[in-house]
Image (tube, helix red, strand yellow):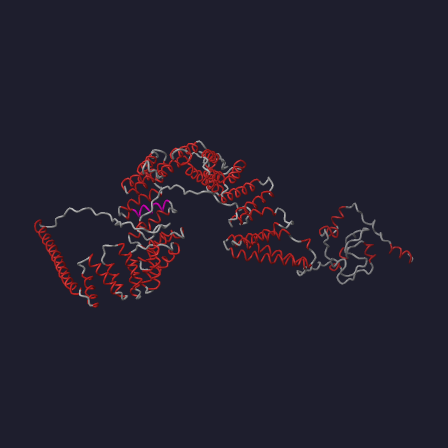
Amino acid sequence: MNQFDAMEDEDDLYGGFNEYSALNTEEILRDESVQQAVRTSHGRRAPNIAAAGTAGKPPPTGTRAGLRTGQVGAGAAGTEARPMTAVRAAGFTRNARKGSAGDIRPAPPLEAKADNSPEEKIRALEKEVVQLVEESCLALSRGEKGAALQKAKEAAKKEKDLLRKREDLSSTDQANMDLTYMVLFNLANQYQANDMYQEALNAYQAIVKNKMFAHAGRLKVNMGNIYFRQKQFAKAIKFYRMALDQIPNTHKSLRIKIMQNIGIAFIKMGQVHDAITSFEHIMQEQPDFKTGFNLLLCYYTINERNMMKMAFTKMLSVDLKLGDPDRYTLAPNSDRQTELIQEVIRNDDLRKVEMEREQDAERRIKMAAKIIAPVIEETFSDGYDWCIDQVKSSAFLNIGHDLEIDKAMMFLKQRDFHQGEESLHRKAIESLKSFEKKDTRLASAAGVNLSFLHYLEGNLQQADKYADQSLQADRYNPAALVNKGNVFYQQKDFERARDFYNDALNNDSSCVEALYNLGLVNKRLGRMEEALDAFQKLHTIFKNSAQVIYQLADVFEKIGERNQAQEWYLQLNGILPTDPKLLQRLAAFCEDEGDKSQAFSYYYDSFRYYPANLDVIEWLGAYYIEAQFCEKAIGYFERAAMMQPGQVKWPLMIASCHRRSGNYQVALETYKSVHRRFPDNVECLKFLVRISTDLGLDEAAEYTAKLKKAEKSQEAREQRQASAGRRSSVVGQAGSRENSAGTGGYRPQAQMPPQPHQQQRQPLQQQPSMDYEDPLGAERERPRTAARRAPVDEFADEELDDTLLPE
């Protein structure tokens, strides 16, 4: 072979290709190089086996030798060489340099992208804004209005910084309008929650006027709500109507709520006919109990009897959409799994919502019947009968019996002078007695009310009888247990009364009458700690109840905690600042502490609110005398003399004030007037003698003689009283000795049974009218009764729909 042939062989790229049989699959299975390549597919390379098989042997210098032999590496010695294809493998170069084909190393890790780019800064700032808005909403949900507003302001400030940075980068077209809307809306809501109405309106205006915000016109509902709270009802109606124009008809529920707000605003303005138009439209489109009740009240205002009946009938036809009530009833022969499911769904959230909706409907129906019953017919009874008939023929059949009980209670509140109060009382009792033979629930309720009526009349025997009947119908009725306990309370059997109050609380822990009466009976039994515990529990329920706060103060005073008692009295004074007896009690505390000036302030305020309290009048007069202002004390003693003209003490105090102030002539005339009315008064004669002597009058001798005569008659009178007292004591001792000697022991004598303590009634005195009960009076020690009371009248349901206001 010459040189040219050798060079040709070296240049033959496809040399040795045919030496390998492609159809011989058995050789492929035995070929380690091919199997290794298969196991390391998908871009993974086999380890460099050349180093292991040819240790210490350098690789061939020419690549063509490797291509001719078809070996992947020298480690394949002893096996048939693998053929090469025309496609060059990835990762191999023409020259087999070290580290190129066989030495494959992992790629270096990706470099972290720098966070200081403008885009990343903008994204981070957006996250901060969203975080602040979320914190603001959470703070408002917790009732922290100030913190919520502060967070909303911080979010608005950062959002402005975000817009400024976008302007610097010339990327305003990429501004996040949803974020801007969220920030402004939350800020407006926080302003509104903090009663900063003008700032809230400005924030809402910024949203509404921006054309970039879609559906921003709905926020005019919130603006209308703000004007409503500011009592600018005309502007409120204007914004409600503007919002109504921008809301499509597909949002029917929202349009109905806005119409309700418009109707209530018209009622506030006194435009009842316009309100009727709004409510009638709602009752035609989507009737509900709240709108029906407001419509009935509007007809009641304009005295439309037939329309009131029509509105009441429409209310009864409203569908509550509660579904099938039988789904909560367990079918007979049900398996354990069905029982568990029924037990769960009876108390789930959906059932609670349905119960609240049903209770609200019943409350409005009862209230509507109570309002229209006296005016839709000739008499109150006929009107209530019509309402009861309508209810019994509707889906609210179970309310009919409740209305009959309410009718009986309303007899007591009527003041018909033609029939008389006793006749109405008798009608109420007869109506309640008709329920005695009905189902258990009605019989128990009627028994409670009958017991309550007889208790108010002072007929404890009948009250006890009907309380027992109510307990027989329903042993766990807390109201019946309270009335039973009240009977024992009036009979001075405090232990048994306490037991019944405890039973009522065990059956119903929310029975506040039982809890209050339990505190009273514990006070009577001397169990001050238990009474204090009961009244403290009541205070957690009724924070501003004057009765409860007074009882707490009284208990603390009885156990010697005067500082605590004074604090509670001061708290009560904040609730009842015009209570004269409370002010008198606070004055006594200050006087005991030596604070005369503060005591005078309280006594003076008590006198201003009730100028007929003799104790206060006497204290104020003595205070002015001690302070050397006798002229001011005269007015108080003159008032006391007018209230008690038969008491010699007051004109003597008036004369003494004149004498102390140096008006001796006026003092003399006053003493003479007192002497003419009370000629045997020694004190008056003493002062007449002294003044006449000081003034050098001839009448001094005459008054001296009268004084000696009066003193002698007074001494004789005192001696007769003393001798009569000694004689009665001697006779009593002799009689006792005679009785014991005659019978040889103790002889029981017939005695009258002990009478219950009765408060002595004083003559009625003119007292300024007060819209609260006197917490320091004796009525506070009277236990509370349990009876069904008719709901209080109300004109309109003024609840606004804040559907668009975020929580």
Answer above or below: position of 267 versus 519: above
- The percent coordinates of residue 571 (x first, y second) are 38, 57
Horizontally, is 57 left or right of 229 in the view?
A: right
Q: In which quarter of the image is residue 460?
A: top left
- The percent coordinates of residue 395 (x first, y second) are 46, 33
Question: Looking at the image, which residue is at 68% across and 55% down?
Answer: 172
Instruction: Give the camera-side residue of 654 and 342.
Output: 654
Residue 75 lies in magenta, yes or no?
Answer: no
Q: In which quarter of the image is residue 794?
A: top left
Answer above or below: position of 476 versus 3: above
Quadrant of the drawing holding the N terminus: bottom right
Instruction: Give the camera-side residue of 68 and 88.
Output: 88
Instruction: Give the camera-side residue of 81 and 662.
Output: 662
- The percent coordinates of residue 342 (x first, y second) are 47, 39
- The percent coordinates of residue 397 (x first, y second) are 43, 34
How many labels were placed on the picture?
A: 0
Question: Looking at the image, which residue is at 17% across and 65% down?
Answer: 698
Answer above or below: position of 262 versus 671: above
Residue 501 lies in magenta, yes or no?
Answer: yes
Instruction: Please state the extent of the stretch shown in magenta in the rendering.
Output: 497-507
